[in-house]
Image (cartoon, rainbow, N blue to C red):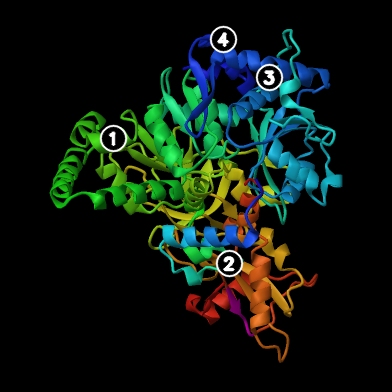
Amino acid sequence: MLDLRQYASLGAALKDALERWPNETCLIEADRDREKVRLTYSDFKEMARPLCRALEDADFKAGDRAAIIMTNQSKWLISAYSIFFCGGVLVPLDYKLTAAEHLQLLAHSKARFLVVEYYLWRAITQSREFAKLTVEIVLVTEAPAGADLRGAYRWEEFKRKGEPQFVVRQREDTACIVYSSGTGGRPKGCVLTHDSYLEQCASLTAWYPFWPGVRYLSILPTNHAIDFMVGFIGPFVCGACVVHLRTLRPEFVRDAFVRYRITYVSLVPMVLKNLERGLRAKFDELKPRKRWMLDRLIGLNKMLTRGRPRVEISRRLLPQVHKAFGGELRALIVGGAFTDPSTLQFFYDLGIPVTCGYGLTEACTAVTLNDLKPFRADTVGKPLPGSEVRVLNPDSDGIGEVAVRSRAVMSHYLDDAEQTAQTIVEGWLLTGDLGRFDGDGRGHLQLVGRKKNMIVTAGGKNIYPEDIEAVFDGLPVKEFCVFAANYLWPQKTLGNEMLVVVVRLEQNQQFDDRLREEMISRNRRLADFKRVGGYLVWEKDFPRTASLKIKRGELAAEIGAGTARAGVVGI
Amino acid sequence: MSAPPADRTLDEILNLAASHFKVAREKLTPDGDFFKTLGIDSLQALDLLTRLEHHFRIELPDYELQGVSDFRTLANRIRARL
């Protein structure tokens, strides 16, 4: 791999990677069972050149911001590289947000440029808020012939030849602004420097190296911190190959493991669970004799891999299982949300190294990761090289708020000094997550809950109650407030997370079917992963500040002490 | 070839969803939230999309499911491609 200490920016490192491995395949893009794109590092450079020239022609300057809203595909990475090459700041936005949310974050980030997939651009142009678009130049990919692009340009139209000028950036310059939340409330744009990414990349690849010939299956959205690092920067600075799928249908994902003999893949727990479900169903279909044999072989594998993974032996013991994953899988990397230890154990017992980590956008990508020495299903691993992790004010069980200090931590939240000051205190990032170091003396971190009022879905999405409350504005009740259930009723475990809308009715008002229907209808305006799971009728007025803001902390404590979680009614 | 009547498309989707996820047909309504009534996550919903593709002999990109959580809207998206 490249020696990242020698580079001042992501652009410089990526540029050298394209020179270093010209004939290695860097990208494969498949749609269902059809391979659409296969690029070497040299091809990648050629494809980026016209876009770099286009950015130059548009007077794109060092530090200018450019957003990308696209599903995983080669053009995502080519666009990102071109932006870095030209000295820009990348703003990767979640393609699953609504058009209104995209417009809001584009405005907040002050992006001058936008690269966007056609169907997403179409949604943005049809949005009622389209007039609020603040971006100057829009490049749309894969637009059908004759489509009205409302002033945008076609990505594929750029054919300018000639060598663009590389723009030098320094380690302390901003590389990316990544939104961790805030579409309905205060946007939290994490400002991450080139130094953050280069440091993070060096420490991750020290434990899980890539090399030419490694094939990484990119399933998580590339805008997500994990895929951006291990599905782009990491493989590229090591000469490895990234495989993109244009569909995430489980059957095509399963095929891709075999077709491309995948080496690594990162998953959120929801996908891992889906794979587990599929395998368990297949095991259940086996005839009793074969099932008996399988169980014995799994037992033997467990015994042989107790201390460390022994992939070669596991592949021989359980060839059918390993063939289903392509036969060359070295690790399933799981993160983004709480993972059920039994699911992790299930895969490890089959001889598939599965490594669980912990990270947050504010810390670039990962803070801790399991190094499989030995495998632990009950922890999120050990701090990565270069990361210091502390548990603040531990209670008698050693549980306290997890704090992180490393060069990978963001420099600040964009245009929000107040939130920055609350989150980074004396150089330590306060994560809002509760954890403890387990007693094995090896520094394994266990997460046990959240201090902050938010949830993380099994799909790895952070949902803050403040961000979704707007949808309930005007609900015919005296007042309402949305909370994470685990914030109201803290529990010393993760998982089982849901949002609850707490309503205070008007005097003499009854909670009737009409109100319930209204609540359901409003809830359904939210994306499925953002919806509240239940409601609670509260009998007292909400405590408020002098400026009439709800005192959320105080109200949560009152509710937690005054009622039980069982009182929540599902909607 | 013109698309079949809206009701028929919807009905076929409801029947297929009920049998695929082993849920009683009468529990499913056109405007019901299929994540909730079928008890599925977004990946299982993509699985349903595949079944629907085979049934209607069309190709549905994943994004056709983005923001959709009720059968009626899904039926409209499918009808637009028939």
Q: Secondary structure at mark 1?
A: helix
Q: Are the two marked residues, 4 and 2, in contact with CB atoms closer than 8 angstroms?
A: no
Q: CA distance from mark 4 to mark 2?
A: 54 Å
Which quadrant of the figure has residue A394?
A: bottom left
Disc 1 to disc 4, C-alpha distance = 35 Å
Is A426 situated left or right of A472 in this image?
left
Q: Which mark is residue A85?
A: 3
Residue A16 visible: no
**Same-chain check, marks 1 and 2:** no
Q: Which mark is residue A322?
A: 1
Return the residue nearer the eye: A293 or A194: A293
**Tags 1 and 2 touching, CB below 8 Å:** no
Q: Amino acid at mark 2?
A: Gly
Name the mark nearer the viewer: 4 or 2: 2
Q: Is residue A520 visible?
A: yes
Tell me if A100 is positioned left or right of A33 in this view: right
Q: Range of the magenta residues?
A: A535-539
Compared with A524, A507 (above or below) is: below
Q: Which residue is mark 4?
A: A19
Circle 3 crowding by C-alpha within 10 Å: few under 14, some 14–19, many from 20? many
The label on residue B32 is 2
Q: Residue at x 79, y 43 (%)?
A: A125
- Foreground mark, 1 or 3, reads 1
